[in-house]
Image (cartoon, coloured by chain):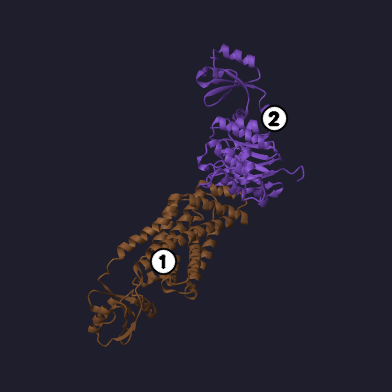
Chain colours: A brown, B purple
Amino acid sequence: MMKRLFAIWHARNLEFLRDRPTLLFTLLLPLGVVIGMGLIFGGPPRPLFTVGVLGARVHARDDPFLHERYVQFVPIATEARGLYEVTHQRIDLLLDLRGAVRYWVNTDSPKGYIVEKLLIAADPGALRQPVTGKAIPYVDWLFPGILAMNMMFSCLFGVGYVVLRYRKSGFLKRLHATPLTPFEFLTAQVLSRLSLIVFVTVVLYAGIGAIIHFHSAGSIALLLLLAVIGSLSMIALGLTIAARFSSEELVGGLLNLLTWPMMLLSGVWFSIAGAPRWVQWAAEVFPLTQLVEAARAVMLDGAGIGRITPNLIYLAVTTLVFLAFGAWSFRWRVD
Amino acid sequence: MPESVPTLEVHNLVKQYPSVTAVNGVSFAVPEGICFGLLGPNGAGKTSTIEIMEGILPPTSGQVRYRGEPVGARFREEAGILFQKTALQDFLTVRQSVALFRGLYQHGLDVDEVLELCALEKLAGRDNRKLSGGQQQRLLLAIALVNDPKVLFLDEPTTGLDPQARRNFWALVESIKARRKTIILTTHYMEEAQLLCDEIAIMDRGRIIAQGAPQRLLSEHFAEVLLELPRHEFPEGARSLPLKLIDASDRVEISTHDLDGTLRTLMEAQVPLRNLRIRPANLEDLFLDLTGKELRA
């Protein structure tokens, strides 16, 4: 079994490495996106204050501060989340209107200083609770998401289209006439794509990290573990699409249907903290959301394995579910 | 294996698709060490039959046994298969393509030995996408031989090849036959079947309509010789002559025991004979005789 598995794994790696345009595209796309987004969003701060509000609805109370112009008020679900946001200067001030008015302001934040003046002018009795913490540059915040997004595209399209091509060309039918089993074939595909993705991600992490002077606050080994489990989950997701279908259009449509919502709602480009609650719950279903959240926690906050264990468990469970479904529905040939 | 157990046995095989019954109650046995030909026109059910035998297409009903056992893991280890149409993995050389498949079997030949057997040594480093049709078929044959199979399936192996490449391929198959391999060959080239096959089964509309050694079948069905005349030179009025006429696409054939008498009859009827051809019957004639239509129709 290992010999057969190795033969398929080796041949697939050669095929990938010799497909130069695809290899270059895989390496250059995320680099270009980071540089482009850095240029677009790395300029002067936007002239807008953001205040997180704990409690039911932002306009539920007639607080005079809520009527200030040029201030965006966003609902925050929990105090812990709000403190995280204000500490990292993702919001300029956190306001609690659930009882006596109190607020948290980051004393390291210039915008926090200004918006605090506006609050005191509107509500002099509000209770002040200072916090400290440096802002995360957007490019640093974006970096884990870009790496994860690149992994997602490589996993889904790299596996989905390759298996589809094999099926349509009759190569899978030829393999079916050998002692190779579906499990061996799928496992070889998963391992081949996994080893290539981990390699590419390590190269990108080192290369882009050097360009933007990024240093992970957390363990590199933990990041590697996260990359492996996250990749496995998304490769397995790609196999569920590739396992059965024979139409490029259908597979392309299904892959786009998966990747676009993940790309927009998994928090790769912007925080969805201000989005409706149902959108946030829906986004939690995506493996990419779990991967991005955990990667940011490790890379930006220095989180340990304890904090990202729920993400790792979710990714591992989805890997098994997707693989089982893929193996069950696998077809060697065009029906 | 006891002497009496055939290498392959097919029992009452049926394959139904939603709109057609491709294989309709086919049964035959293939003894060890022979080349068995499955002949028929496109759509006769040859490929469905052979793919069920290969274990890659489930039958609607019926059974295939390999060396007395249902087709299973042993069969997959010991069978070599050349499909009618197969694409290989991109970006691999000829040698790497053969090595890939060698890695899927427990036992087999060395990659170099297979390359030599199929005259591919000089092409070993070439990208498999840059081969001619004949070279591509030799590579697919090499892949089919990589596990040193006891039974080899060749599904229309020379379709689309030029005459030279076809003859080269036949020479290769002859050399494999000399190694006492059991070969199952499907083809609609009668010359190929007559040259390579020890026994044939002729299929039409999902059924076997004749089976046996080619020469025996021919002698059973044809004690006559055939006279061929171009259709456009055969007068309509001559159709009323007391002759056994067979209509082919571009010619009229006359089957006869009495060559001298038939020629006299034609001359008396003033049928032009300048393009007359006289030949013995072949498998194509046999098929025409059995079904009333041509094999390559």
Task: Classify B249 as above or below B7.
Answer: above
The residue that mark 2 highlights is B216
- Pick the front one: B42 or A99: A99
Residue A127, located in which quarter of the rendered image? bottom left
In x, y percent, where is residue B58? 60, 49
Left or right relative to A1: residue A69: left
Q: Nearer the viewer, mark 1 or mark 2?
A: 1
**Residue lying at the far top of the rendered structure:** B268
Left or right relative to A160: residue A76: left
The amino acid at mark 1 is: Pro
**Residue lying at the far right of the rendered structure:** B2
The residue that mark 1 highlights is A144
Residue B225, located in which quarter of the rendered image? top right
Q: Residues within 10 Å of mark 1 (few under 14, many from 20)?
A: many
Residue, x 23% and y 78% (percent of image)?
A: A67
In x, y percent, where is residue B207? 61, 39
The amino acid at mark 2 is: Arg
Task: Classify A163 as above or below A220.
Answer: above
Residue B189 shows in the view: no
Separation of disc 1 and disc 2 at Cα? 76 Å
- Pointer 1 chain: A
Residue B7, located in which quarter of the rendered image? top right
Whether label 1 touches label 2, CB < 8 Å = no
Residue B182 shows in the view: yes
The reply to whether label 1 and label 2 mark residues of one chain is no
Residue, x 44% and y 66% (percent of image)?
A: A286
Mark 1 element type: helix
Mark 2 element type: helix
In x, y percent, where is residue B224? 65, 22
- Pointer 2 chain: B
Task: Classify B182 as above or below A223.
Answer: above
Q: Residues within 10 Å of mark 2 (few under 14, many from 20)?
A: few
